């Protein structure tokens, strides 16, 4: 799949997820085979850029792979300015968020709320594409409600405005993350535009990735929640797509190494106080089995980096013994 001058090595992309796809997580997913990892959503409002959270999201030092930065907002001029600033900071692709269903985003008429306003969509896309000389991509949902699936219309606007590729989550804004994603609309979108289309939603296994690619005809799949606590899912999917065979489950020693490296990268990026709190979330995803609930509860009570790392070392030592 080609995005502007960038030829992706395969069909696997990491979905942007606020509070999840920070640099440590993106680098892990890239290491395990993802071709592209899109950053966390960044507001186009410059008044909020002077915060630790925004500064970390706008910094690309130590970034692996192609640097794709997602921006969100409803004002064409502010979105264009945000795109320019992020390109100056090192972004190689600008991704526009018109898929987020969160109330705090939608009440500002941003995210998937924009799908109700095709003319505003057009104005934003035209402004951003004209403002930067890097590829601009777009992420949408299939519409704003099941009875208002206008994804084809939005996709055609995107193509006309010069959008380089389009990612589509197989739910409407009203659906949030409930129920199951549907892929018929994504298939219809693919049939109605010539730009690359990326399918997103409920892709958690190699078999599901194969099914979605075949069903939609999409150029790639975008994986979000399916990679939480399982960054190696990209390796598993790529192997299955290439061979039709499933890889053996990840070895205990490798999982230990991945988790501890991930935590250390979080501490380095955020500092101890914030880093160990963010680590709790990721460890909760890594250890998501019902039998591991007491372990997660104990981990969440730990207050130092040393305690967190020591507890995980002991946990894996016990696994190896048994």
Image (tube, rainbow, N blue to C red):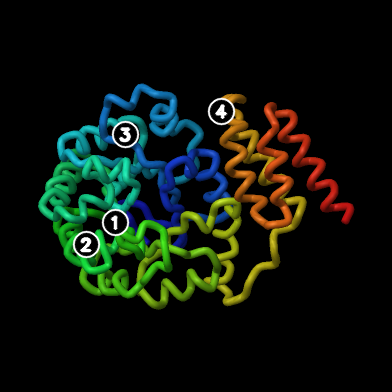
Residue on which disc 2 sits:
155
In 3D space, how far apart are the residues under numbered discs 3 and 2 (Cα atoms)?
24 Å
- Mark whose residue sits in front, 3 or 4: 4
Q: Secondary structure at mark 4?
A: helix
Which quadrant, please, contains the C terminus? bottom right
Q: Is residue 135 visible?
A: no
Q: Are marks 1 and 2 in contact (CB under 8 Å)?
A: yes
Q: Position of residue 244 (x, y in %)?
A: 57, 77
In 3D space, how far apart are the residues under numbered discs 1 and 2 (Cα atoms)?
9 Å
Q: Secondary structure at mark 2?
A: helix
Residue on which disc 1 sits:
140
First in residue order: circle 3 vs circle 2? 3
Q: Is residue 235 above or below residue 297?
A: below
Q: Position of residue 125 (x, y in %)?
A: 18, 48
- Say few, some or many: other residues with alpha carbon within 10 Å of mark 4 (under 14 / 14 to 19 / 20 or more): few
Residue 86, numbered circle:
3
Residue on which disc 4 sits:
274
First in residue order: circle 1 vs circle 2? 1
In 3D space, how far apart are the residues under numbered discs 4 and 2 (Cα atoms)?
39 Å
First in residue order: circle 3 vs circle 4? 3
- Mark whose residue sits in front, 1 or 2: 1
In 3D space, how far apart are the residues under numbered discs 3 and 4 (Cα atoms)?
25 Å
Dividing the picture into quadrants, the one containing residue 127 is top left
First in residue order: circle 4 vs circle 2? 2
First in residue order: circle 1 vs circle 4? 1
Left or right relative to 16: residue 260: right
């Amino acid at each position: 799949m080609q995005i502007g001058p960038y030829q992706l090595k395969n069909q696997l992309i990491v979905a942007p997820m606020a509070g999840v796809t920070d640099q440590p997580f993106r680098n892990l997913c890239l290491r395990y085979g993802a071709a592209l990892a899109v950053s966390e959503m960044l507001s186009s409002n410059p008044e909020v850029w002077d915060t630790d959270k925004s500064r970390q999201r706008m910094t690309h030092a130590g970034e692996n792979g192609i640097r794709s930065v997602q921006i969100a907002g409803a004002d064409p001029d502010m979105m264009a300015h945000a795109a320019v600033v992020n390109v100056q900071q090192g972004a190689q692709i600008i991704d526009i968020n018109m898929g987020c269903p969160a109330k705090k985003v939608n009440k500002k008429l941003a995210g998937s709320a924009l799908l109700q306003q095709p003319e505003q969509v057009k104005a934003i896309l035209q402004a951003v594409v004209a403002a930067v000389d890097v590829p601009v991509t777009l992420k949408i949902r299939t519409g704003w409600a099941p009875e208002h699936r206008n994804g084809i219309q939005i996709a055609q606007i995107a193509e006309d405005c010069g959008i380089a590729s389009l990612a589509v989550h197989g739910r409407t804004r009203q659906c949030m993350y409930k129920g199951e994603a549907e892929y018929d609309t994504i298939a219809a979108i693919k049939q109605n535009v010539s730009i690359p289309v990326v399918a997103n939603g409920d892709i958690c296994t190699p078999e599901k990735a194969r099914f979605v690619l075949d069903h939609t005809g999409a150029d790639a799949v975008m994986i979000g929640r399916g990679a939480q606590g399982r960054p190696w899912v990209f390796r598993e999917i790529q192997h299955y797509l290439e061979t039709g065979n499933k890889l053996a489950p990840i070895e205990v020693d490798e999982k230990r190494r991945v988790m501890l490296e991930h935590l250390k990268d979080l501490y380095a990026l955020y500092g101890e106080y914030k880093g160990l709190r963010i680590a709790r979330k990721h460890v909760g995803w890594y250890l998501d089995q019902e039998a591991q609930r007491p372990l997660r509860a104990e981990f969440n009570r730990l207050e130092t980096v040393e305690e967190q790392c020591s507890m995980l070392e002991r946990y894996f030592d016990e696994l190896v013994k048994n």
